[in-house]
Image (tube, helix red, strand yellow):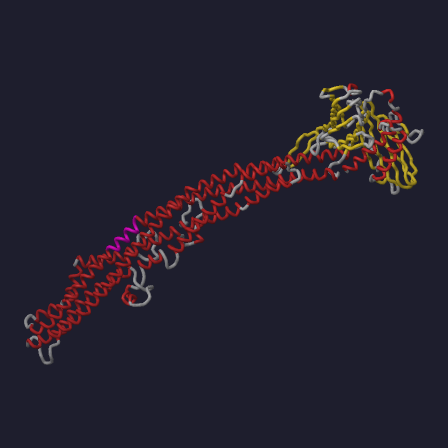
Amino acid sequence: MRANSMPLRVVAVAATTTLIGIGSLMPAFAADSDIAVVNTETIQVYTTPTGEVDEQRIYEQLSFTGNGTVDVVNPVSIEGLRNLDGFGGFDVDGGNQMATVEVDGEERLRTVSDFNGDLPLTVSIQYYLDDELVEPSDIVGESGELEVKYTVKNVTGVDQDVSFDDGKGGTVTKTVAVPIPMVGSLSTTVPSNFTDVRSDQANIAGDGRGGTKMSFTMTLFPPIGSDTAEFSYTANISDGVVPPATISALPVNPLESPSFAAAGESYQGGAATGIELADGASEIDANLLKLRDGAGELLAGLIKLRDGAQELEAGLAGEASPGANLLAEGAGQLSDGVGELSDGSDQLDAGATKLASGQAALEGGLTTLYKAVDALPASVKQQLKTNQDYQTLLASLQSISDGVGARTDSPTAGTLLGGINGIQYAMRYPVPSARDCTDAEPQRCGAMDAVETVAGGMTLALSAGGSIDQLKGAVNSIKGTPGCDAVCEATVDAVVAGGIDDALRTSTTQARDGLSSVVGGVDAGLLASGAGLDQIRAGLSNGDPAQCLAAKGTATTTDDCGIKQGARFLKLYGIPMLVDALANNISNQILAGLGKPTAGCEPEATLRCAAAALADGGSELSLGMGGLVDGVAKLRAGGDELSDGANRLAGGLEDAADGSGLLAGGLEDAANGAPALEDGAQRLSDEGTSLLVEAGKSTAQTYGELYAVIEAGAERADSEKMAFGAPEGALGLTAYTYEIRGDDGESGRNIARGLGGLALLGAGAGAFALRRRFI
């Protein structure tokens, strides 16, 4: 016996029992404290084998559970309204079924009436026999390969404005078609003369009688599904027929259905991720632009530092080093002159000895000698005042002292120590609190101060450059979201691979470390206490001129005289004291010899007394010349030390000049490389983070729109889910069944439509069972 020829009584009983069971499982809303009411609407539609609507009616069932009496006002279609539970009628008032129901356990009221409202779905079926489009009647009795194509479309869509986040702090409003979300299934059973049944979309099983059952599931609303479902099956047939099919469908709220809520949450999460991506990328882009601007300021600072280093090199190589060489040369000449003086003093000592031995024979001219000797110191001093060589020597020593200057001299004093202070000021401004390296035109900023400021700026840029790894992590996290398909993952990989790298961080770190190394080297080798410039200062000015000889005899070198003190020692004590000592010693010794003859002997009276006195004076002169030789020897030693110190100063200044040249060259390279840092930051912004910001905004808007459409559909599902509506306080449910008629060539044996209405309850039960799958 064919399935569609089963006695309708059996179908009706089974359908009724199933529908009641479904109703009892449905959640109910209490109409009063004792009775729960559930209203189910089932719209039955009969179509031709190609999907054109023939008839449509609505079946309503009111189910009551509890104890007591309830008054019901149920909106219904009153055209052709009939009672399915008996022959009695209903009270109708203004399109509402009016009833008072006494309930003791369970009660129900069932009705059927004509339905003239709009249907939510349209159905179209096409038939192909051996790849040729045919009418359904052309299949009856034929053989070949049959393909049946179904097209079901949700036609409830209406244009509606939806708003969602634009990914940059605002909202976007867009008009989209929002349908009532519908889900459903199409089922059909083909007879045993349909063999090799195939379908890419259907669930296929046997019916236990040689036939094949197929079921197609439909999600008829975007963006989770589509408003149109297309599916088909193919079979080899003999003595062909057109099998009937049934569609069961109902509206569903996707935000409350476990089957669809996860999809809605994924769209909502995708929108939130897009916003976070756009915000994070915007912040990184802003920091990149700050890095670009900082690179520009770095370039300006490097150029100024380079220019200062070039000026330092010019000062050291062009002025300080040649001057130190001249000083060394003069000190060498002074040492040579003192050496010649030492040789002469040795010869003078030998002559004085001979004089002392020969004075015993001197007898004449003692009176003249006495007068000349008495006037000798004053005469020598008077002659030295007009002696050009002597005065030139003293002036040269004074010039050396003045040229060295004082340690506190300003850079503009025109002295060696003032110049060294200028060098130090150019390297490090002495008052840290007054430095103005960050000003547009700094006036109190040494070279190393500027380098240190630049290195600090690079360190700050590097701490912001740490957000690159965060950006990669944020972008890659999109791939883990439920809504990110293969195209989304490929886009994320492309953005990470093409827009972000660590080249900027590496180059900035190297540049910063290089500058810090320069600062450390200069501070330690040139500016540190006891090194570099301090050593030069000590060589130029140190100690007490009056203690130069005593300091030289001590074990420490910290009290040794510098060039300035050595020159002042020679001018104030060495040469004048030598001359005075020489003149006074000669005068005193000769006068003592002439004025102290032997007792009782007048020098003018007797030659013996004069000769004795002269002999005594010659001996004393010989002793004094020995002291002179010692003094000249010490002076020669001091001149040698002065020459050595001047040579060391010249060598140190040459090394400083070479170092300043290297510093200037390094700063030139840094200045040439700084524009690449600025250009790289701009390019990373233009080609990387800016695109990432746009991608985040696009992601936020795309997923935001999808979720907004789902929300709007959910609102329509709640407000428009019923064809007529439920009684106040009752739970209302609506389902649609489309009975697609088949064609077996025996249309005259169709069963009476009135009895077929009862069979609809079975189809309605199937629709509500479908609801349980999605709710």
Vertical placement of residue 708 versus 533, above or below: above
Above or below, 98 against 751 in this view is below
Whether residue 547 is situated above or below residue 164 in the rendered picture: below
Q: Does the magenta portion include 464?
A: no
Determine whether, in the image, residue 605 is placed left or right of residue 82. left
Say which residue appears at 40% left-offset and 48% top-offset.
443
* Residue 319 counted in the magenta span: yes
The percent coordinates of residue 223 (x first, y second) are 69, 33
Q: Is residue 56 visible?
A: yes
Instruction: Please tell me which residue lies in front, 642 or 105.
Output: 105
Expressed as whole percent of the image width and height from the top left, the position of residue 349 reads 15, 68
Residue 485 placement: quadrant:
top right
The region drawn magenta spans: 318-329
Quarter of the image with the C terminus is top right
Q: Please report the residue visible at 20 percent of the width from the left and 61 percent of the height from the top.
A: 338
Q: Nearer the viewer, residue 284 or 182?
A: 182
Q: Residue 318 location in percent, x, y?
A: 30, 48
Q: Is residue 57 left or right of residue 145?
A: right
